[in-house]
Amino acid sequence: MKWRLMAAAAAAVLMLQACGNDDNNWSTLSGDPTLVIGHRGASGLRPEHTLESYQLAIEQGADFIEPDLVLTSDGEMVARHEPILDDTTDVATKFGAERKRTRSLDGVPTTAYWASDFTLAEIKTLRAVQSRAGRSKAYDGQFTIPTLAEVIALAKSASTSTGRTIGIYPEIKHSTFHAGLFGANVFEDKLVAALHTAWGNSKSAPVFIQSFEVSNLQYLRGKTAIRLVQLIDADDVKDDGSMSLVAPYRQPYDFVVKGDARLFSDLLTPAGLDFVKTYADAIGPWKPYLVKTVNDGVERTGDTTLTVNDRRVDGSTGVVEAAHARGLLVHTWTFRDDSGIYGFKDAQTEIAYYMKLGLDGIFTDFPATGVAARKTVD
């Protein structure tokens, strides 16, 4: 990542921000407080992508809930993190191994139970389970897999009952994969139709559409005024704070298919941000792209154990400032109370640090922590 290209501008903007945070003058693009987005709901406490997880996120104060979307065999949009059902449902206890199939997912041969091989009626017989090690399994087997329509209904109902607008933040999962099964942009057309029915074709709709691919967002730009978000991935962050880019996290997969040599990191250079601005309203980079942290072997948290929490925090990389200079919002992911806290003792402190840099939105598995962090900033 070419951090030096942005360093001087970043320093100047940060100095201005440091002088201008009085009276709740947030450093976000709009000047409004940072959005708290329930990542797969309140997935730290409930099985992800269930109505119960989304409901808890709303109760904890999340502004948006995030349904990752995949298609069933009969073309229904359901909320799952991947088109693979194995790790997040009890599918193996209800359907035999003969329902498994080997497919290529972003270039990786994968044998699994695929949502696209099951009807919605079949998927409704499944129950969600906690997929992350170390988290409570107390709710396994209790909650069904929701459709997008059900998520929209929940957001609308909660907006009425709480008196605050609850938005949704759908992600189109693996657009190229789904296009190979259902046809080019069939998925995107279904999503836009549902969102326009619910909220109209408006930039002010309480909706962001996100994708790690590029071509589908470019297509959507010609179909909707709803805000679009270009996600930026990586597979790891190196000891020196630079990004590790290894397939399938090296490039947008549609770039791979087209032979486009650009990496995810290239989309955050000045030229890359200019390109993204032609079709998207926001960028959604993984958080180590935004704040440089270094593993220098120094224990800082006082627990005598060296972990990622002990990394030295070197500050903004300049990406937030460069994006804002182009009118692009910046939303980052994922903040977790129980893992991946790079350079901070706890998640609340980490989130507050990012918010003070002007992040327009943060994704967290624990929305209550995000809301608590925001209160320390305003």
Image (cartoon, rainbow, N blue to C red):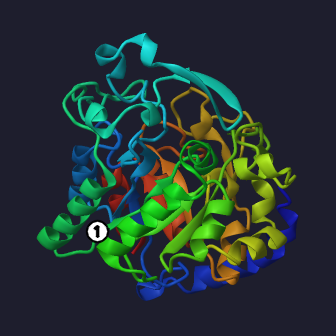
> Can residue 45 be seen at all in this image of the molecule?
no
State the residue at coordinates (12%, 69%). 161
Q: Residue at x 59, y 75 (%)?
A: 221
User: Can you identify the residue that label 1 sits on?
Assistant: 166
Q: How many marks?
A: 1
User: From the image, which quarter does the N terminus lie in?
Assistant: bottom right
Q: Residues within 10 Å of mark 1 (few under 14, many from 20)?
A: many
Question: Quadrant of residue 275 in the image?
Answer: bottom right
Which one is in front, 87 or 97?
97
Task: Indicate the secondary structure of the residue bearing disc 1.
Answer: loop
Whether residue 161 can be seen here: yes
Residue closer to the observer: 326 or 150: 150
Vertical relation: 298 (above or below) 41 = above
Q: Nearer the viewer, residue 285 or 154?
A: 154
> Which residue is found at the position 50% from the left and 43% from the top?
345
The residue under the point 29% across, 17% down is: 94
Image: 93 above or below 300 = above
Q: Is residue 326 left or right of residue 220?
A: right
On screen, residue 190 versus residue 152, left or right, reads right
In the rendering, at what x and y percent does residue 205 appear?
38, 78
x and y percentages locating residue 41 in the rendered image = 33, 49
x and y, in percent, of residue 61 in the image? 27, 62
Q: Amino acid at mark 1?
A: Ile
Quick one: which residue is furthest to the left in this view?
Answer: 161
Q: Nearer the viewer, residue 99 or 263?
A: 99
Residue at the limit of the structure toward the top, as seen here? 97
The C terminus lies in quadrant: bottom left
